[in-house]
């Protein structure tokens, strides 16, 4: 088996707890991730699922080193990036791209779509043939060329998320972090964006960490799943195995809590006491 | 027996003349849970606000009737209308944090409504609030009543608001996406609570949601909305067995289902959207023709 893209061992992240910050002085640290071990295999989409406060977003931010872990190692292509200083991270940044939940706040309101997509290309010395590269990026995500001159407020939620994807993929990164990228979207738009990501991930052989609270979406898109709760991994396995034979009670509870779009008169009845 | 809520041909426009509700009709029997389902811009929240008399000033009702238990709201003076709506309806909002006053303790916020609108005395209101907190399975009412909203979790806050909504024994509750902001396990508990209280109190609920899964579990009847128009109305069981409108079918096919990953998450077909646009245009043309 090929070497995984990411190999994470004993990962801990502690962040300042601002609710307990004294008037003067530092906020006490609270441990968000409490020692995680996992691999992300190359060329496939891994789902990271959990409820609010499970630490799934913190985990994503640590992988792309928006955060520095307090302990443990993050091996990316065999090199531990857990504590690399920013100067040494910079050349790696083009390989670690991200797409966020709310493209409205992650797209610069004063720049055209073309300039938003071009920015990372320019910064990484790919400033030649910018027009062609931007045109390719737009085409890749199914946006008409006429969108190049528009601004973010002229786009619908789904179109903005397409721009977010175009920007992240413009540099052909080795890794893409997708954090709740369809949470704010209507189901019909959600289906379009997920189908697009699914197609691009397969075509480009992308390694993706797909963070979501929605197990139904994860099942469709991901080859393996990591279930998180309160800063720990509850269960991690291949997608089919997880859904067909969940080992942990917590995973079973999560599945049972999803209201499927079908009639089930017993769903709301309290469980009979065991 | 008259319907709990009757809406006939309700149309509303924005200042620029654009129609946001398009001849909406629906009728709720006492004790019925009716889901209003649709995507953003479908007008589902707008209908709830129209019923509660809290439409934003930018929206103007230009046609139609609404009546609560046989009383025509349009014929009442504003003051009498507010009193009637206040006494017979309640709201369970989406975001319990913004619906609660952050600088007041939970207790007075819950009893205030009973004292002010129904004219109860403080003791009676307090007793009633405690009874409802017990019904929403809050086991430490003293602590909760003394808390400020930020001291409670999202699920607890939603329980408090459900208790507050049922406390005054309204005939109709508008529940506007009451579980959208919650985690799935908490959502299930809250849906179960709403269903239990609804059954015990015999309250009718207008349940606004974007989630067909929630529709299937909570409602007996459903109105599917698109661009302020009811495109399909049905018993919930029938809707899921045999959806008639192409848009309803498309919504169902787009909704993710972990039990059937490759038959779900289907993008809505262009022809369905074109059909909807034509349907809306035709309805607007007829309407303009009738209303000059």
Image: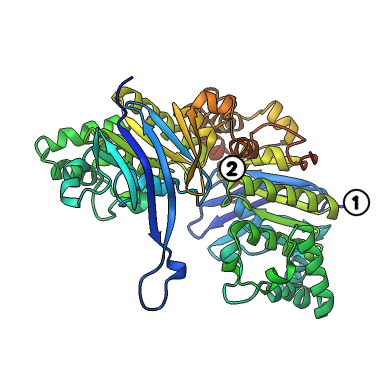
Q: Nearer the viewer, mark 2 or mark 1?
A: 2
Q: Position of residue A77 (x, y in %)?
A: 25, 32
Q: Is residue A221 above or below residue B45?
A: above
Judge from the rendering whether residue A81 lies leftward or rightward of residue A199; answer left or right.
left
Q: Earlier in the sequence, mark 2 or mark 1?
A: 1
Judge from the rendering whether residue A32 lies leftward or rightward of residue B129; answer left or right.
left
Element type at mark 2: loop
Q: Position of residue A149 (x, y in %)?
A: 23, 44
Quadrant in the rendering for residue A99:
top left
Question: Real-space Cα distance between discs 2 and 1?
Answer: 30 Å
Contact check, label 2 and label 1, Cβ < 8 Å: no
* Residue at image point 30% right, 52% down: A68
Determine if residue A122 is in view.
yes
Q: Is residue B64 above or below residue A165?
A: below
Colouring scheme, one of rainbow, by chain, secondary structure, one colour: rainbow
Is A136 or A75 nearer to us in this picture?
A75
Determine if residue B231 is in view.
no
Label 1 environment density (alpha carbons within 10 Å; few <14, some 14–19, many ≥20):
few
Check residue B1 in the rendering and tell me which mark sits there, or answer none: 1
Quadrant in the rendering for residue A129:
top left
**Mark 2 sits on what residue?**
B38
Check residue A263 in the rendering and tell me which mark sits there, or answer none: none
Element type at mark 1: loop
Judge from the rendering whether residue B66 lies leftward or rightward of residue B208; answer left or right.
right
Q: Please give the chain letter of the residue carrying mark 2.
A: B
Q: Please give the chain letter of the residue carrying mark 1.
A: B
Judge from the rendering whether residue A143 lies leftward or rightward of residue A256; answer left or right.
left
Label 2 environment density (alpha carbons within 10 Å; few <14, some 14–19, many ≥20):
many
Q: Position of residue B170 (x, y in %)?
A: 79, 61
* Residue at image point 57% right, 76% down: B103
* Residue at image point 15% right, 37% down: A131
Query: Do circles 2 and 1 both sit on a common chain?
Result: yes
């Amino acid at each position: 088996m090929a070497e995984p893209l990411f190999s994470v061992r004993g990962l801990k992240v502690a962040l300042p707890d601002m609710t307990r910050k004294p008037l003067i002085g530092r906020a006490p640290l609270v441990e968000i991730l409490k020692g995680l071990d996992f691999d992300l295999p190359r060329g496939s989409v891994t789902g990271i699922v959990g409820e609010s406060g499970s630490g799934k977003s913190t985990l994503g931010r640590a992988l792309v080193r928006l955060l520095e872990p307090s302990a443990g190692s993050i091996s990316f292509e065999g090199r531990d990036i857990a504590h690399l200083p920013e100067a040494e991270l910079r050349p790696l940044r083009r390989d670690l791209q991200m797409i966020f939940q709310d493209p409205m706040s992650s797209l610069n309101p004063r720049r055209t779509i073309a300039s938003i997509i071009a920015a990372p290309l320019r910064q990484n010395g790919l400033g030649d043939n910018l027009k062609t590269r931007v045109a390719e990026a737009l085409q890749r995500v199914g946006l008409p060329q006429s969108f190049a001159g528009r601004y973010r407020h002229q786009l619908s939620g789904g179109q903005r998320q397409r721009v977010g994807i175009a920007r992240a993929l413009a540099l052909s990164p080795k890794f893409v972090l997708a954090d709740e990228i369809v949470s704010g979207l209507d189901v019909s738009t959600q289906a379009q964006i997920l189908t697009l990501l699914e197609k691009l991930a397969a075509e480009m052989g992308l390694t993706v960490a797909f963070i979501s609270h929605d197990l139904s979406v994860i099942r469709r898109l991901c080859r393996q799943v990591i279930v998180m709760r309160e800063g720990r991994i509850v269960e991690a396995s291949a997608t089919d195995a997880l859904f067909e034979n969940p080992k942990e009670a917590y995973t079973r509870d999560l599945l049972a809590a999803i209201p499927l779009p079908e009639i089930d008169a017993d769903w709301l009845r309290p469980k009979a006491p065991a | 027996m008259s319907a709990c809520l009757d809406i006939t041909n309700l149309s509303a426009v924005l200042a620029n003349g654009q129609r946001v509700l398009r001849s909406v009709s629906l009728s709720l029997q006492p004790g019925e849970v009716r889901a209003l389902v649709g995507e953003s811009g479908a007008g589902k929240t707008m209908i709830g606000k129209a019923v509660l008399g809290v439409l934003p000033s930018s929206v103007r009702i230009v046609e139609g009737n609404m009546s609560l238990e046989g009383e025509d709201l349009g014929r009442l003076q504003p003051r009498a209308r507010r009193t009637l709506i206040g006494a017979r309806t309640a709201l369970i909002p989406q975001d319990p944090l913004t619906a609660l006053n952050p600088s007041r303790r939970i207790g007075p916020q819950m009893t205030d409504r009973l004292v002010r609108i129904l004219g109860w005395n403080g003791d009676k209101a307090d007793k009633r609030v405690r009874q409802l907190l017990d019904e929403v399975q809050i086991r430490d009412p003293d602590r909760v009543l003394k808390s400020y909203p930020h001291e409670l979790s999202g699920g607890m806050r939603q329980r408090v608001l459900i208790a507050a909504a049922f406390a005054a024994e309204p005939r109709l509750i508008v529940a506007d996406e009451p579980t959208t902001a919650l985690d799935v396990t908490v959502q299930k508990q809250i849906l179960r609570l709403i269903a239990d209280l609804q059954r015990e109190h015999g309250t009718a609920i207008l349940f606004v949601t974007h989630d067909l899964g929630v529709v299937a579990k909570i409602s007996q009847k459903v109105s599917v909305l698109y661009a302020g128009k009811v495109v399909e109305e049905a018993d919930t069981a029938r809707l899921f067995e045999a959806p008639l409108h192409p848009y309803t079918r498309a919504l169902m096919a787009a909704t993710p289902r972990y039990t059937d990953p490759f038959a779900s998450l289907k993008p809505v077909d262009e022809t369905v959207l074109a059909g909807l646009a034509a349907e809306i245009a035709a309805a607007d043309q007829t309407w303009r023709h009738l209303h000059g």
